[in-house]
Image (spheres, helix red, strand yellow):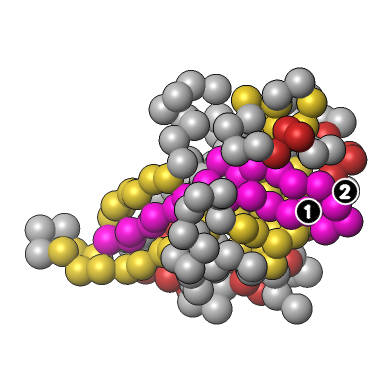
Amino acid sequence: MTDEARREGFRTVSKFPPPGALSWARALLLGLAPLPLANSFDDWASLASICDTGWLLASRRPSIATARIAQRRLRALSTRPVSFGAFAALRPGEGPVHLRGTCAALPGHGAARALWRLDVSEQADVGRVLIEEGNDFVLAVDGGGEVYVLSNGGHLVSGAPLQPGDAVSVFGFADAIPDAIGLAASASGRGGLIRAIRSGSELPMLVTHVVR
């Protein structure tokens, strides 16, 4: 893991997908019900964050082939969350895997500010753009154990900002990184390493609010 990939936050500005792409992606998600992720889109604009990623190749003309690829990949999002013990047993790079728990700001970071947010804005030169700002955070996994969430390259797929204390599902790939925040003193790390979850080379990590 490089220093660049380990930075604690990011901000991206991207062109908003055309309406046809969102309509196709929405229909595909709803067609895969029951899919926990599909219930997280209280604002369908948040679906734009995963268009043109490995999850939804929205820039390509919809076809049977692209739909089958998307369906196969999106089915990974219907898996049940795993325990911390099962996650800790994975080798770096294994996944995608589903973790569920409560998010918290990194030690020393303001607990009152949003950890992640997604906004749509109008820019005179390009039109509608999607602005996404995320920060690394700690996930207290349901059932015990803490995992470091590497935000870089990931996407929030809920319309509401992510706040400390929110219950979330995280879909990503296992990793182990040097401890820089003191978690390794607990059962969540060994030998100065802590368990982490991150984006993969083709599939970005996804973070979504848990819908009760």
Nearer-the-camera pick, 167 or 27: 167
Amino acid at pointer 2:
Ser
Amino acid at pointer 1:
Val
Nearer-the-camera pick, 198 or 18: 198
Neighbor class of circle 1 (other Cα within 10 Å; few <14, some 14-19, many 20+) is many
Residue 8 screen position, x and y as percent: 46, 41
Q: Is residue 66 left or right of residue 16?
A: right
Residue drawn at the location 85% of the way across and 52% of the way down: 144
Quarter in which the N terminus is drawn? top right
Residue 205 screen position, x and y as percent: 59, 45
Q: Earlier in the sequence, mark 2 or mark 1?
A: 2
Q: Which mark is residue 83?
A: 2
Mark 1 lies on a secondary structure that is: strand
Q: Is residue 142 magenta?
A: yes
In contact (CB < 8 Å): disc 2 and disc 1: yes
Give the number of the mark in front: 2 or 1: 1
Q: Is residue 150 left or right of residue 38?
A: left
From this view, report whether residue 1 is shown above or below residue 26: above
From this view, report whether residue 66 is shown above or below residue 174: below
Q: Which residues are magenta?
A: 129-150
Residue drawn at the location 70% of the way across and 39% of the way down: 183
Q: Which mark is residue 163?
A: none
Residue matched to label 1: 141
Q: What is the CA distance from the residue labelled 2 to the residue labelled 1?
A: 7 Å
Q: Main secondary structure of the magenta part?
A: strand
Residue 78 screen position, x and y as percent: 78, 57
> Residue 180 appears in which quarter of the rendering?
top right
Nearer-the-camera pick, 88 or 53: 88
Residue drawn at the location 33% of the way across and 59% of the way down: 131
> Residue 124 appears in which quarter of the rendering?
bottom left
Q: Is residue 212 magenta?
A: no
